[in-house]
């Protein structure tokens, strides 16, 4: 058992070093972090401009500046939270307060749920097929099992994903501290940590899909196309289910469970997390079976 763990850790370390050394991965990660920072700054700047304008109007009407700033800040948060509740499709009181306590929290969490599948697709679609195509996996399996290789490579990509999302959360926090006139760190930091933790099983799900596609394909471009096809097929299942009156298809796509991640109800959150982990485990199992039967 110790040998297996040591072998897997060696793969994880090697794959992480290889990932950060590739120009494509660095470019995608850099673009993702840069777009996150730019989006956060733009949002926070808009909030500040609107807040300053409303405070100016209130002061000109004879209101106290500090009291006006407090009331306007509260109303802006209420308006943003109401919009988030509308977008999620649930009543405001059912949402997890930790995810909406600060204005940057729902923006970070919602944008991450939207764009992280694309990040994983672009950074991980070829992490299996490249070794299969070059036959390097043939030599690696002389001292490691195929399953150890698969687990190590997947854990490396999941670790990379976790680090990227953590850095992204830190960038959002920093931009909020710089840009926003008032931000409660006591509410924002726990909320960001909760959001980051919830995003991990989501990342595992989509990473397993790319791993499966990368195991099936014979070349990197094919892996990319297979991953895109699977993601589109999963997205369209709900539409197809509506057309043919097959409501159970709605439960067979990962994005169906996004709503539960926002809720304050612990059973709802755990159900959604379990669903993402279940999808991930299923596709990872398929990848394991495919690699076990491939001629290396």
Image (cartoon, rainbow, N blue to C red):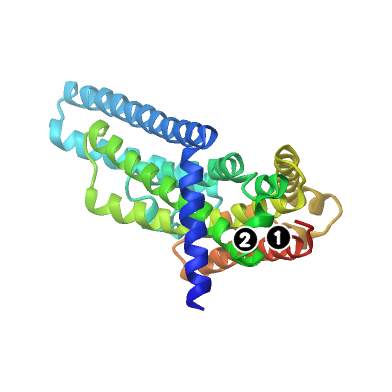
The local secondary structure at tag 2 comes to: helix
Residue at 60 percent across and 65 percent down: it is 144
The image shows residue 129 at horizontal and vertical percentages of 69, 47
**Apparent side of residue 279 relative to residue 180 in the rendered image (left or right):** right
Residue at 36 percent across and 41 percent down: it is 104
**Apparent side of residue 104 relative to residue 154 in the rendered image (left or right):** left
Q: In this rendering, does residue 199 appear at all?
A: no
Residue at 47 percent across and 63 percent down: it is 9
In this view, the mark in front (1 or 2): 2
The image shows residue 26 at horizontal and vertical percentages of 47, 35
* Inter-mark Cα distance, 1 to 2: 8 Å
**Apparent side of residue 149 relative to residue 73 in the rendered image (left or right):** right
Residue lying farthest right? 244
Kindly indicate the quadrant of the structure image that contains residue 121: top right
Above or below, 216 relative to 270: above
Question: Quarter holding the C terminus?
Answer: bottom right
Crowding around mark 1 (Cα neighbors within 10 Å: few <14, some 14 to 19, many 20+) is: many
Above or below, 202 relative to 285: above
Q: Which residue is mark 1?
A: 287
Crowding around mark 2 (Cα neighbors within 10 Å: few <14, some 14 to 19, many 20+) is: many
**What's the mark number on residue 150?**
2
Out of 163 and 139, give the one closest to the viewer. Answer: 139
Out of 235 and 295, give the one closest to the viewer. Answer: 295
């Amino acid at each position: 058992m110790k040998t297996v763990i040591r072998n897997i850790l060696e793969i994880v370390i090697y794959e992480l070093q290889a990932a950060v050394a590739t120009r494509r991965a660095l470019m995608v990660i850099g673009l993702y972090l840069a777009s996150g920072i730019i989006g956060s700054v733009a949002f926070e700047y808009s909030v500040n401009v609107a807040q300053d304008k409303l405070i100016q109007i209130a002061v000109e009407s004879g209101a106290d500046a500090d009291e006006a700033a407090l009331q306007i800040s509260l109303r802006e948060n209420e308006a943003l939270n109401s919009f988030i509740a509308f977008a999620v499709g649930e009543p405001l009181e059912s949402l997890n307060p930790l995810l909406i306590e600060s204005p940057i929290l729902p923006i970070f969490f919602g944008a991450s749920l939207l764009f992280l599948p694309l990040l994983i697709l672009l950074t991980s679609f070829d992490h299996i097929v490249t070794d299969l195509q070059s036959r390097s996996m043939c030599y690696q399996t002389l001292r490691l099992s195929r399953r150890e290789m698969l687990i190590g490579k997947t854990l490396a990509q999941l670790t990379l994903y976790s680090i990227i999302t953590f850095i992204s959360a830190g960038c959002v926090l920093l931009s909020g501290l710089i840009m926003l006139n008032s931000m409660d760190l006591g509410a924002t930091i726990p909320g960001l940590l909760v959001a980051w933790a919830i995003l991990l099983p989501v990342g595992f799900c989509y990473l397993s899909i790319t791993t499966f596609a990368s195991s099936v394909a014979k070349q990197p471009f094919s892996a990319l196309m297979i991953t895109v096809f699977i993601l589109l097929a999963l997205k369209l299942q709900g539409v197809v289910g509506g057309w043919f009156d097959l409501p159970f298809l709605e439960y067979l796509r990962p994005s169906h469970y996004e709503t539960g991640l926002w809720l304050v109800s612990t059973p709802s959150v755990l159900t959604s997390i379990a669903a993402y982990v279940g999808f991930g485990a299923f596709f990872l199992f398929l990848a394991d079976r495919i690699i076990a039967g491939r001629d290396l």
